[in-house]
Amino acid sequence: MSSPGPLILVVDDEEHIQRLVRMNLEVENFRVITASSGTEAIERVRKDLPDLVLLDVGMPGLDGFETLRLIREISEVPVIMLTVRSDEEDIVRGLELGADDYITKPFRTRELSSRIRAVLRRTRGVPPETAVLKIDDYLSVDYNRREVIVGGKRVKLRPTEFRLLYHLIENAGWVVPHEVLLAKVWGHEYREEVHYLRLYITYLRQKIEPDPAHPRYILTERGVGYRFVDFRHPQQDQGQQDQGKEEKQQNG
């Protein structure tokens, strides 16, 4: 007997959209529950503990953004925003509030199911760790609690922030290209979505860097990707940074 599929909460005030999404997702072996308002969605998240929420932005009363803000006060459940809007400001706003992805209507069924599977993969996909990793006297990473310890204070990371930091640290000292980070953290479908990466790098720097405008840990390799400082071989990393500064000066 096959195991039950992931439980998806579909939040939309239009019943025909609920029916359409339910029908297509159930064919893909997802289990589906629905809510017609933001208030009902929050109650469903509390009681039913869905594996993922599909959340429409344009609802009367509590809109999708406000509903997402309230969901994030009680749960880290993955959320994909559904909207007819495609404006970048709306996308950034949704991501800033804690959305994991954003898809615009009308969407293809295969695209929706693909996005759901990608979000579920990346929210479940970080291998468990048992230790607190000390980067230096200022920064440590608690893998069990998915927190960073910054200057002696604990700071909670969002799931996507934690996955991004995990992959950067795993490759400390090496440049990780944009498309590789996007594939590992968001999924192969997102290899071109560089704005996702830039936004979450900004979030991480604000949480872990002493001075986010002049990062010590997450270094930008322009046009290529990002590199976490080589804390395991600090002298070698310092030599590489000094060499890079010399090359910039020589080139003008």
Image (cartoon, grey):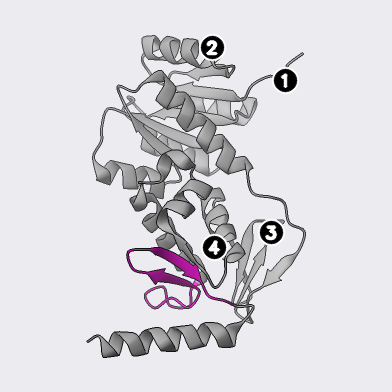
* Residue designated by label 3: 143
Mark 3 or mark 1: whose residue is earlier in sequence: 1
Which numbered circle lies on residue 198? none
Q: In this rendering, does residue 100 appear at all?
A: no
Mark 4 or mark 2: whose residue is earlier in sequence: 2
Distance of label 2 from label 3 (alpha carbons): 36 Å
Indicate the amino acid at tag 3.
Answer: Tyr
* Residue designated by label 1: 3
Number of other residues with Cα within 10 Å of mark 1, as a class: few under 14, some 14 to 19, many 20 or more? few
Q: Position of residue 130 (x, y in %)?
A: 77, 59
Which numbered circle lies on residue 27? 2
Q: Where is residue 196 in the image (x, y as percent from the top left)?
A: 38, 50
Quick check: marks 3 and 1 in contact, CB under 8 Å?
A: no
Looking at the rendered image, the disc whose residue lies closer to the viewer, 4 or 3, is 4
Q: Residue drawn 37% across and 63% down?
A: 224
Describe the element under mark 3 as helix, strand or loop. loop
